Structure formats: structure tokens, C-alpha cells
Amino acid sequence: MKLGFLAVTTLFLCEWAAAMPLDGKALYQENCASCHGPTGMGGAGPKLVGDASEWTPKLFERAVLRGIDDQGKALKTPMPHWEKGSFKTDKGAAPSKAEVDAIQHHLHALK
Ligand code: HEC
């Protein structure tokens, strides 16, 4: 009885977490702002607002996850190739496209 209740509660909590909208602003602040600036206007890395924020999601995902820019050129260090890494709150799991899209939406909204 008790175990059944626990299993149902756990299932419910997992589904609830999966349905939560991703916080693109928090993801950006935690993982990108140190190089691209708190408002995406650039720093050690290039400005993203009004530039990469306007790329197609496919190109933006490719740049962030695989380090290839909109011209097909390899992005140099220190830009991380995120598919080999993990966002800070993801505990080692590789970033999902949905997370990358949420970051791009945040940057697009900053324009
Ligand atoms: C340690 C510093 C650093 C971090 C952290 C970082 N970047 Fe970068 N990023 C760079 C640098 C430097 C470049 C430019 C590389 C080049 O031109 O070869 C770059 C380039 C890019 C580009 C291509 C921009 C263009 O116009 O060509 C995108 C898109 C990008 N970063 C997104 C992100 C996102 C999203 C995050 C967070 C998930 C992030 N970066 C985290 C340093 C960083």
C-alpha cells in the first residue's frame, strides 16, 4: 500500500517537472552570461542579442551544441561545445535542444 502511494507520488512529481516551462533566462544567466554579458550584448564572447538570437533555431542549436556558426565555421575556444558538457543545474546531463531553444527565446526577447 505504502509503496504504491510512493510510486504514484513520484510519477506525479516527475510529470509535473517535465511539464514545467524551461527558464531560458536562468539557463542563460547560469551558463552563458559570464562570457556573453548579462544582457547578451557581449563580453569575452560576441554579442548574441540582435545577431545569433535571430538565427533559425537549427543554426542556433548547432552553434551552441556543436560549436559551428551560421557560416559553417568552427567556433573557437573558450566557446564550449555544449553537447560534450552540461548546463550547471543539469547534474552532468547533456543540454537538450529545448533548453537551447529557451535560451534563444530569452535572447530574442531582449532585443
Ligand atoms: C567561456 C566563455 C563562453 C561561454 C561560457 C559561452 N560562450 Fe558562446 N562564445 C564564446 C566565444 C569566445 C565565442 C566566439 C568564438 C569564435 O568566434 O570563434 C562564442 C560564440 C558563440 C556563438 C556564435 C556567435 C556568432 O555570432 O558567431 C553563440 C550562438 C554562442 N556563443 C552562444 C552561447 C550560449 C547560448 C552559451 C551558454 C549556453 C555560451 N555561448 C557560453 C564564449 C563563451
Image (cartoon, helix red, strand yellow):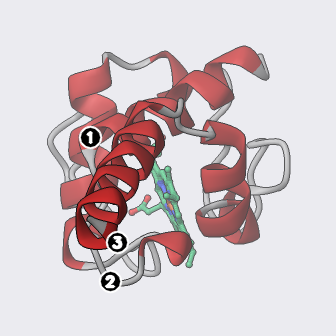
- The quadrant in which the N terminus is found is bottom left
Q: Estimate how packed mark 3 is, as few (under 14), some (14 to 19) or many (20 or more) residues with alpha carbons within 10 Å.
A: few
Name the spot of residue 110 as percent of width and height, x first.
79, 23
Residue 100 visible to the viewer: no
Describe the element under mark 1 as helix, strand or loop.
Answer: helix
Q: Residues within 10 Å of mark 2 (few under 14, many from 20)?
A: few
* 3 vs 1, front mark: 1
Q: Position of residue 48 (x, y in %)?
A: 61, 38
Q: Earlier in the sequence, mark 1 or mark 2?
A: 2
Q: Is mark 2 on a helix, strand or loop?
A: loop
**Residue appearing at x 35%, y 65% in the figure:** 6
Disc 3 under 8 Å from ligand 1? The reply is yes
Q: Mark 1 points at which residue?
A: 97
* Image coords of residue 30 (percent x, y): 68, 66
Query: SS at mark 3?
Result: loop
Q: Is residue 29 above or below residue 99?
A: below
Q: Mark 3 points at which residue?
A: 76
In screen coordinates, is 71 left or right of 50? left
Residue 51 image position (x, y, % from top left): 56, 26
Q: Nearer the viewer, residue 32 or 95?
A: 95
Q: Residue 92 carries which label?
A: 2
